[in-house]
Amino acid sequence: MQFVPIRSKSRILAQKSSRLTKKTLRWLIVLSTVPLFGFVTAFGIAPNTPYLHDVQIEEVVRDLYLPEVLPELESSTDQSFWRQESIRRGDTIAAILDRLDVSHQDKIDFLRAARDSRAMRQLRPGKIIHAQTTADGNLLMLRYFFGNEELFLMEKTDHTFKMTEQKIELESQIQMKSGTVRSSLFAATDSAGIPNTAAAQMIDIFASDIDFHRDLRKGDRFTVVYETLLDSNGEHAKTGKVLAVEFVNNNKTHQAVYFQSSNGDFGYYTPDGESLRKAFLKAPLEFSRISSGFTNARFHPVLKKWRAHKGIDYAAPTGTPVKATANGTVTFAGTQRGYGKLIIVKHDGKYETAYGHLSGFAKGLTKGIRINQGDTIGFVGMTGMATGPHLHYELRVDGVQRDPSKVILPTTPPIAKKDLPAFQNETKSMLARLDIMRNLHLASLN
């Protein structure tokens, strides 16, 4: 093949033509005498080559035929989109509609139609509201699963909102996902496509064995088997319970499976049937960082002197929910000197826990009330002697503050002997699923 060198730069000129229509464009194309084969060949030219001579330039005018112009798309205002918003603590339906960019008039009409709705009085943080809207903010439909598998449905018909609240039958499907911690646990679960509700359950399941504030390591791995509940149309309604989970933390493997016993009790157990529910959680906050540990010598940031710090401080934003680490009875809920707003809970036997510097107490929390492990009892603040928002947490044994990380705490009973055969049968199936997903995930990392 002979290569013809081009000395001048090619010029592409646009030229109007009397024959220019919607179908055709006339272009003035400057072409060399190189034949057109329908492909481009890249080549280099050595300097001082004898082929570097003047090349005749020829102007060629050709009609370029374009496809038929498509009909105009329907107005974007007529198109509809499904959007979703997570319910936040303290949310109102008006605030959620604003975040969904619902028009002012539709928001007013919706609030008027839903004023007596039970569902709108049960906006639970973490749950999802689905809405169908047009591009200009017209609200067409809104769905919210609330209570015990109940559906709130609001539809617009002839410019009027019609509301229904009904019990629905949900179909369960099993999902299996795996991931690896690179930066944070929730970043890893998001990357793996695991819903936040399933991730939160995973944290609760291992809360007595893994301190997710201090123990989490880069490279930790997890595999989870959980339910997805679908409505009669096959659409996702909500995330169900975690059925089995494996978490490899600092090269130590933790496994749990869900089981409901013959007497109706349910919980999470190791494959050997030991209960994973300890009497005490390892931490009273889901996610935070420890700003001060248990020590006999700490320089106090307010008093400006060295003194013992008989608890653990968890730095967290004001308003972060504080959980009870064990079942018990509230013996104090008020203000106490340097603790600021303080809650003290008496547990079975010789144990007490204290929660200080709170910004406020949970609704209805008073002295003498019985609470359960994991209940929200208050919110992080900086009352009392505090330089920033954090929770001061104490574990007291026989009235003396002790380091929670060094106290051997009681456990709950294992699987009853009469339930062992059923438990072992269910466990075998769940462990097989964990094995499959773990091996697939490890293979994808290699």
Image (cartoon, grey):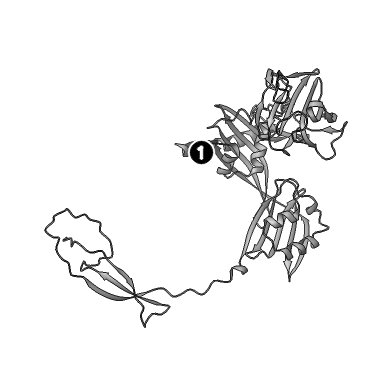
**Rendered location of residue 78, percent (x, y):** 62, 69
* Side (left or right) of 66 relative to 442: left
* Side (left or right) of 165 relative to 195: right
What residue is rendered at 68% in x and 65% in y? Answer: 138
Query: Dividing the picture into quarters, in which one does residue 446 lie?
Result: top left
What residue is rendered at 69% in x and 37% in y? Answer: 317
Outermost residue toward the bottom?
Answer: 18
Q: Can residue 425 be spotted in the picture?
A: no
Per the image, the residue denoted by label 1 is 441
Viewer-nearest residue: 387 or 264: 387
What residue is rendered at 75% in x and 23% in y? Answer: 395
**Rendered location of residue 36, percent (x, y):** 25, 67
Viewer-nearest residue: 170 or 369: 369
**Rendered location of residue 235, percent (x, y):** 65, 55
Quarter holding the N terminus?
bottom left
Q: Is residue 407 above or below residue 257?
A: above
Q: Is residue 136 above or below residue 438?
A: below
Outermost residue toward the front?
Answer: 304
Q: Is residue 43 above or below residue 402?
A: below
In what element is the residue under mark 1?
helix
Outermost residue toward the right?
Answer: 368
**Amino acid type of the residue tagged 1 in the rendering:** His
Viewer-nearest residue: 104 or 177: 104
Q: Can residue 13 be spotted in the picture?
A: yes
**Rendered location of residue 104, percent (x, y):** 72, 63
How would you rate the neighbour count of disc 1 (Cα within 10 Å): few for under 14, some for 14-19, many for 20 or more?
A: some
